[in-house]
Image (cartoon, grey):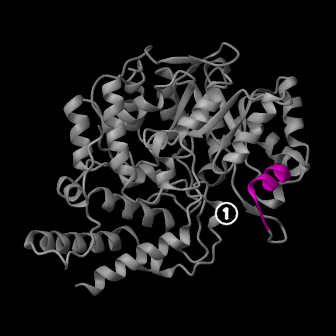
Amino acid sequence: MVRKLSRRQFIKVAGAASVATAAAVAGCSTGSETKAEGMSLGEVAEGKMTMRENLHGEQVSLLGYGCMRFPTIEGENGREENLPLDQDAINRLVDYAIEHGVNLFDTAPPYCKGQSEHAVGIALSRHPRSKYYVSTKLSNFVAETWSREASIKMYHNSMRELKVDYLDYYMLHSIGGTRRDADGRELDSMELLNRRFFDNGMLDFLCEEREKGRIHNLGFSYHGDIKVFDYLLSLQDNGKYHWDHVLIQHNYVDWNHSKLLNERNTNSSYLYGELAKRNIPVFVMEPLLGGQLVNLNDHAIGMLKQREPQASVASWAFRFAGNQPRILTVLSGMTYIEHLQDNIRTYSPHKPLNDEELHMLEEIAEVYANFKTVPCTGCKYCMPCPYGIDIPTIFDHFNKCLNEGNVLSNPADEADDEARRAFRKARRRFLIDYDRAVPSFRQADHCIGCGRCLAECPQGIQIPEQMQRINDYVESLKLSM
């Protein structure tokens, strides 16, 4: 029986959580010596990495290196600015990963403001080709890239940047979303799928490239409309196409509670089940739900620490993400060596979760899903905002405060002084930290609701509505002072 917490109980047990640094979950991050918090210490084993087998019998590391978040040479976090990546730091991270059994590296043309593929190519080309598998994507998001010529150009450019003459894994990137065409008309998810991959003959072209050996595994990454996911799988069922792998968002909250976070989402238990019954290997993204499963409240962290005091909070999420047998690899964007070491430790080797541990994570997931955080994973596809709003940082701050019990309702109707004191303390802390995290000219009150960000968000977040919600909350706090 899952124990439910009331708002008051949740607030009392919530406090200063052990959290990852903000830069660590923000995207291409600073190359400073900042340490990652919430990580376990101890020896990092070599030669112990858990390996999984793909459809061709190749051994792939359960931990995959997601190359969306890389250190930069300067600046605070590299969110919107085209800051140069720290190639020396990236080389060291890649070298360490390969030395400890990580052999899959996943990137895409837009990652790190278009710099990721190039940096990955430099880092990996220093190693024998047999030491690694490289994965990238056809990121023909905007109308200008929907033509066959533009899409083929993007495909060939990826191989040039990555310094390879074949791709181990290639994906149709971010299927299931919506976009506007060149005339400004919004396309639904199926029409967009056809424009990007079918009308231009690109899927047939990529299948031909697979037959020629220039692509070894062809798949897709899924974000959004379930009818597109089901449609692509039906193409395999009727024998027209086949998929070598599929990338899905999967973690212990999304397993059963994805729809609570966002009505557009589909629980990863369904996604995984549909892939597993077709024997399609599964890539996992967002095992930490954009870092939110490290930013847990004290009650949840206490449950995990009581079970295994030396294990990191993050390690529980990674153990869950790799728990199902058809999971081929779990991608993690590891900006700092501490992240890389902790994740290697978790999967060297992977320790399957038992029923009692799965029940504990489900209890944490249910409490988390019923507190209305914004389901932002920090991908930053919504940036830059034309009006300068720092969308990911606003969501990150609001979620962090909510998880720590620092987002409260005004208890004016409550009699006890304790509740009023808690509210005043939380109000002050939220407002001060908000101003520190987000400059005033980049806060939620500057959102005009233009909607430019909506088509960019793979989570389908109604960003203007959430900005209004957060701004209304901020204004209510100021009025109550």
Q: Which residues are magenta?
A: 186-196
Q: State the residue in front, 263 or 128.
A: 263
Tell whether 320 sits left or right of 263. Answer: left
Q: State the residue in front, 352 or 97.
A: 352
| Residue 201 coordinates in the image, percent (x, y) | 91, 43
Judge whether residue 190 is colored magenta.
Answer: yes
Q: How many marks?
A: 1
| Residue 212 coordinates in the image, percent (x, y) | 88, 24
Residue displayed at 81% across by 60% down: 143
Tell whether 269 sits left or right of 36. Answer: right
Q: In this rendering, is residue 326 above or below 231?
A: above
Figure quadrant of the C terminus: bottom left
Judge whether residue 85 is colored magenta.
Answer: no
Q: In this rendering, is residue 294 above or below 454?
A: above
| Residue 334 coordinates in the image, percent (x, y) | 47, 40
Report helix, strand or loop for mark 1. helix
